Amino acid sequence: MMNVLELRGLTKKFGDFFAVDNMSLQVREGEIFGFLGSNGAGKSTTINMVSSLLRPSGGEIRILDRDIAKHSRFAKMNLGIVPQDLAIYEDMTAFENVSFFAGLYGLRGSELKERVEEALEFVGLSDKAKSFPKNFSGGMKRRLNIACAIAHKPKLIIMDEPTVGIDPQSRNYILTSVRKLNETGCTIIYTSHYMEEVEEICSRIAIVDHGKIIAEGTKEQLKATITDVKDIRIGLKTLDGLEPALLQSIPGIRVLSVQQDEHAVRIQSDAAVDNLSKILKQLIDGGMEIRSVAEQAPTLETVFLTLTGRNLRD
Amino acid sequence: MNNLLSMAWKEMRHDFRDVKTLVFLLAFPILLMLILGFALTNAFSSNATIKDVKVLVHNTSSGQLSKAYAAFAEEAGKTGIVFEDVKTGMDGREEVEQNRYTDYLEISDGGIHLYGSSRSTIESNIVQGMMNSFADRYNAAAAVAKQDPAKVATLLAAAGPEGYIQDSSIDAERQPGAIDYYAIAMTVMIGLWGAMSGGSLIRYEIVRGTAARLAAAPVRKSDIFIGKVLGSVVLNMLCVLVIVMFSKYVFKAYWGDHLLPVFLVLLTEVVMSISLGLAISYMMKGEPSGGVVMIIVQLASFLGGAYFPLGNDIGGFLGSVAGLSPIRWANQALTGIIYNHSMSSAWTAMMLNTGLAVLFIAVAAVMMQRKEGI
């Protein structure tokens, strides 16, 4: 299968800091490729280099088997970008927004009109074509942001956190749209802070940390890499008085994270070490009231936490 | 080309839909024109009273120059100008500075030096004109003396008082009134406001996040750049046109009979201003560039005479700085076209504006090429 995107030793330096460090990656035709990394991991820098917003310090980016440094126009014609920050003009109608951006890709006249209408219909904004985005909800703006990226029918679409800050209904709409786009033959690179989204729609995933890809594969392949780790979640009445450092000192514990919102502690520990009783004793001795204890099957979140030592949303 | 025009059209669409800014762009200069034009009507009265003209003279010359001066002083005295010899202990320059005399004249065999009063400009200019005539005539006589000394007396005698004073009028019936002055000053000022539009051209895309989408699109940076400048020039020129027409037909301001060169000067000013703003926005990234542009525009407006007229004779540091204001060049150019039917200042202003526009655009273009994204 053809590589729609290929990174070969891609590097980006800011002074002495390597934001992207010798990264190599292949995204195949027809994939929805999840690109995961916590803040500062290097995924936005990578996306910005692929979308020509930043110049690489080294390495090569190939789109549809052509080096984008030498075939910039070809690469751009086949690329659609859904930036993390909304990239629409509030003082232009939805139709004008999509029409302006699609026009930059050489579409004119009736073909342009047709494509714009198609894109707006795809994201469910046909009835809002003449409305100004300043009157739109967050979800509608996100959908318009997508429409602006797809009207020219690119082969590769990069979606950088397209569901940030929107209601569940709009989020579901967008996820359905991503699948539909993929079914029409588009290859999609998808980044998100919501692990469940990635788990739901992505066929292959790369985990980025410190500018490097530290794991890559299907969900199943990634989960299979951590058979030696067990994932324990302990629900507490309150987190007041919790001393993570004491828990961390218990043998076998690899990663410990405190889930503030859920009043819970999540622990990745060596599967071979039986330390659950010690963990519970430590908590009870510290005056903590335990509400629930569960040992979970590894999820992508577990994989991410185990590999990077951080939550995706850190 | 299509992308360039798309960018220009998009830019104009933003500007026209930003009603609040558009109203401010038009209402502010019209209101200022109205307020200052009526408040300062008396300051622009064309009736000037000429005071007594007293000239203090320190004459150390001898020979022909001394004789010629004596004859000149006698003739010039008939016009009412009083020539008084400096007395011992008097400091001629100090006397002029204290406004006790209009001018101080030093005559020696080496030449004539005239120190004029900045407080009595008109009177001083009259004396200066007379002394220029005298010097020309004396030089001519000296040249004749070498060939035919007998004709010298005839030549010098031929000059009565009218030989030294020549009436000339630019346009006796047309002097700029307050509204006329502020119509020009405000129009030129909003031309310079183009710098603010220019300063926000790229920042606008960055703030809205659309810079990322533009950078990812198959559009040349130069198309984005030129398209945005073009759109901004059109909008600013339309504002200028509205101000000119409004002042002409509503306030009855005089714009002369040569509107084409007037608009050419204004066009070059607008292009230069937008280029200035654009260059500053590339040199100083982010919000501070907007503040710098605003300071430059306000200083240039103040020194260029947008709020109150500054005479042509201001000297010293203020005069030097005022000479750097594009508003001053354009004011002088338009006044020359409208009242003197003269293009000399207009050519200077247009060349300066165009030259600076090329320089600023070149700076912005180089920085844009070096910059990542747009």
Image (tube, coloured by chain):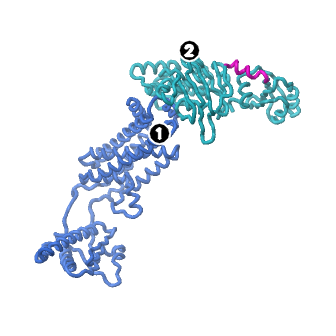
Vertically, is B4 above or below B55?
above
Distance of label 2 from label 1 (alpha carbons): 39 Å
Q: Which residue is mark 1?
A: B369
Kindly identify which chain the residue marked by label 1 belongs to: B
Q: Which chain is blue?
A: B
Give left or right: position of B121 versus A161. left
SS for callout 2: helix
Q: Which residues are the magenta region?
A: A218-229
Q: Residue furthest bottom?
A: B88
Q: Tell me the number on the disc at residue B149.
A: none
Q: Residue at x 42, y 33 (%)?
A: B7
Q: What's under tag 1, amino acid-wise?
A: Gln
Q: Is residue A166 visible?
A: no
Return the x and y of residue B322 as percentages of the image width and height.
Answer: 39, 57
Chain A's colour is cyan
Q: What's under tag 2, amino acid-wise?
A: Glu
Q: Quadrant of the N terminus of chain A?
A: top right
Indicate yes or no whether the magenta region holds residue B9.
no
Return the x and y of residue A247 as percentages of the image width and height.
Answer: 83, 33
Q: Which residue is mark 2?
A: A183
Q: Nearer the viewer, residue A32 or B38?
A: A32
Could you classify mark 1 by the number of other residues whose Cα lies within 10 Å: few (under 14), some (14-19), or many (20 or more)? few
Q: Residue at x 32, y 70 (%)?
A: B117
SS for callout 1: helix
Q: Nearer the viewer, residue B187 or B67?
A: B67
Give residue B146's quadrant in the image.
bottom left
